[in-house]
Image: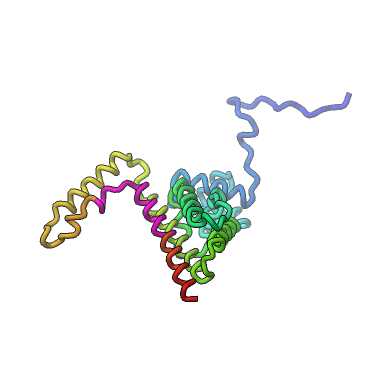
Amino acid sequence: MTAGPLPEPPRPGGRKEEGRKRRTLNRDAIVDVALAIVDAHGLEGLSMRNVAERLQTGPASLYAHVANRAELTELVYDRVLAEVEIPPPDPKDWRKQLKTGLRNMYDVLIAHRDIAYASLARVPIGPNMLEKGDQLLAILIAGKVPDRVAGLAMDFLSLAINSLAYEQSLYPPEATEEEIHEYYEQVTNYFANLSAERFPNLAALAGPLTEPEVEERLNFALDVLVAGVSTLAESAKRRG
């Protein structure tokens, strides 16, 4: 009779060997763990040591795959962008598509705490960023947005969406909608009670300045961004 593999032997406490095995150490596994840390604790909780501990290895072993924390942060940011869906370009509907793509990017970013911060003051050039950037450019090109306007728009649109997402991440995670609403009510009352002689416009517009909810503010910002690109594109076309 041919000897087959032995069954898994019993272990103290009912622990199975699978639970003690280390993950295969490679860049993807490192980024998986790093993203899990960011989702749970934000960028502040991300360190090479914390990642190494979760992978049951030493920090030094990570440097064969990732140069440093800065590179790891960029890799996590790029991994997140893989979740963003950009609609295929349609010349007749490019403005709506641009807004949809930007909204999708915002929604993905805020789902991962403060990861948007990783894009500020640097140019992300990971494979997913290149893909999403090219897809957004395809929408602008389909709308016959001139090259110069399209290039400048891409830079500013990315900055705007990442900034909006990062600001949203600064609200305390434990803050309830009721607490946030109460805070803005206090701000509204503060503006409304300012001296009408010294601050006539702030006092008069206390409501419109502070009452709109996050969703209304976001839609307004997206409308401004898309309308601005459209207006500048038409102006550039007229100038030739």
Query: In the image, is residue 117 above or below residue 54?
Result: below
Q: Nearer the viewer, residue 35 or 54?
A: 35
Query: In the image, is residue 236 above or below residue 214?
Result: below
Q: How many marks?
A: 0
Percent position of residue 10, x then y: 66, 25
Q: Magenta segment, principal secondary structure?
A: helix
Percent position of residue 32, x then y: 57, 46
Q: Nearer the viewer, residue 90 or 127?
A: 90
Left or right: 181 as drawn, with respect to 119 = left
* Residue at (28% x, 41% y) in the render: 179
| Quarter in which the N terminus is drawn | top right
Left or right: 149 as drawn, with respect to 213 = right
| Residue interval drawn in magenta | 208-226
> Was residue 211 drawn as part of the magenta stretch in this picture?
yes
Q: Nearer the viewer, residue 61 or 173?
A: 173
Percent position of residue 144, x then y: 54, 65
Query: In the image, is residue 133 above or below residue 106?
Result: below
Percent position of residue 188, x then y: 21, 49
* Residue at (25% x, 46% y) in the render: 183
Query: Can you name the residue that lies furthest to the right here?
Result: 1
> Was residue 141 drawn as part of the magenta stretch in this picture?
no
